Image (cartoon, rainbow, N blue to C red):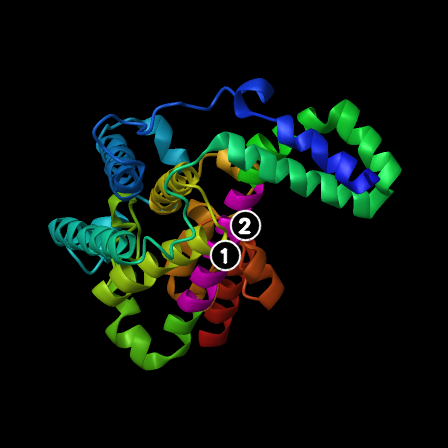
Amino acid sequence: MSYNQSALSYVQSYSADALGYPFYHSNRNELIPGCPDSRLALVLPIVIYWVVSLSYHALDHSGWQWIDKYRVQPAEDADKKNLVSKSEVIRTVVKMQGIQACLGAIWQIFFKNKNAVIKYTNHTAEVQKVGAFVAKWLVKAAGENTASDIMATHGEQLTYYVYWWAGPIARIVLGALILDTYQYWVHRLFHTIPFLYKHVHAVHHRLYVPYAYGSHYNHPIEGGAADALSGILATNLSRMYEREVVLLLAFVAYKSVEDHCGYQWTKHPLRWFSKNDAEFHEIHHQVAGLKYNFSQPMFVMWDRAMGTYLSKEDLEQKKAARKIKKN
């Protein structure tokens, strides 16, 4: 028996029960009884969207003066400058979410055999696959003798952490990066081609002063087909498990509301990892910022890489220069 076979042979005895489960694991086939996880991935983002949006709506009408310092733009500007009524925004958002849910359901029904999203997981079988992956890479990296020794002493721990932590984090991060890449370039395309902006994307920019439940206020082509496709591509190309899909899509729904809420919270946890926040996106909704800040919903990497990042300070300088030019 070669050392390579010896390293791999340890994996054959691995089982999910023996390695243990992380705190977030649930043995239930359905996170919510009676609602398959595939359907939860379609419904939960909508629920989160409206719960968070209505919370911000209540905050907007609370009358609390202490929150005014966190507003990106004055509250009264929403009624003065926006070109669409709030009732029309609500009706359109409900339609967009219905279209997205239907497209997601169609994908699940007709492409389920080709879908990279795994519907059912035999954790023991998957653990052994990951263990074999770890063993093979150890052989390549450190040689057969060292790999065999590592698998004998630390193989179970390595497999556990790769399967339950490194793997899910890597898939979710990859999915987020795919989503951001798609959204940046499609969003920029809508601003670059006059026909697409005039007949499609201009709908969203009727909200000069964004607010929480206006996040999904879009033309059907953009809000339905384009955005739904971004989720399908991100979750399938990253080969996510279904519950990872639920987590990512639910977080994206929450993040999109935060980006349009109109409040720049100074100590918001989301600002620890991303500059893509309410202030960043509201700059894009202003006339001087239309050609900037295309990134959504997670990071700002593409704007920085492509020279389309515009900070609040940069915006003020552009406005000042424009005033001087007019005078």
In this picture, which residue range is highlighted in magenta?
A: 170-187
What residue did someone put label 2 on?
A: 174
Q: Secondary structure at mark 2?
A: helix
Which residue was labeled with disc 1?
178
Q: Residue 98: where, in percent of width, then height?
A: 18, 51
What is the x, y in percent for residue 214? 26, 50
Amino acid at dot 2 = Leu
Q: CA distance from mark 1 to mark 2?
A: 6 Å
State whether residue 141 appears in this view: yes
The tag on residue 109 is: none
Q: Quadrant of the N terminus?
A: top right
Which residue, as the protein is rendered here, is positioned at the far front? 1
The residue positioned 27% from the left and 75% from the top of the image is 198
Whether residue 327 is visible, yes or no, is no
**Kind of residue at badge 1:** Ile
Q: Looking at the magenta stretch, what is its main secondary structure? A: helix
Residue 156 falls in image quadrant = top right
Q: Are marks 1 and 2 in contact (CB under 8 Å)?
A: yes
Binning the other alpha carbons within 10 Å of mark 2 as few (below 14), some (14 to 19) or many (20 upward) gives: some
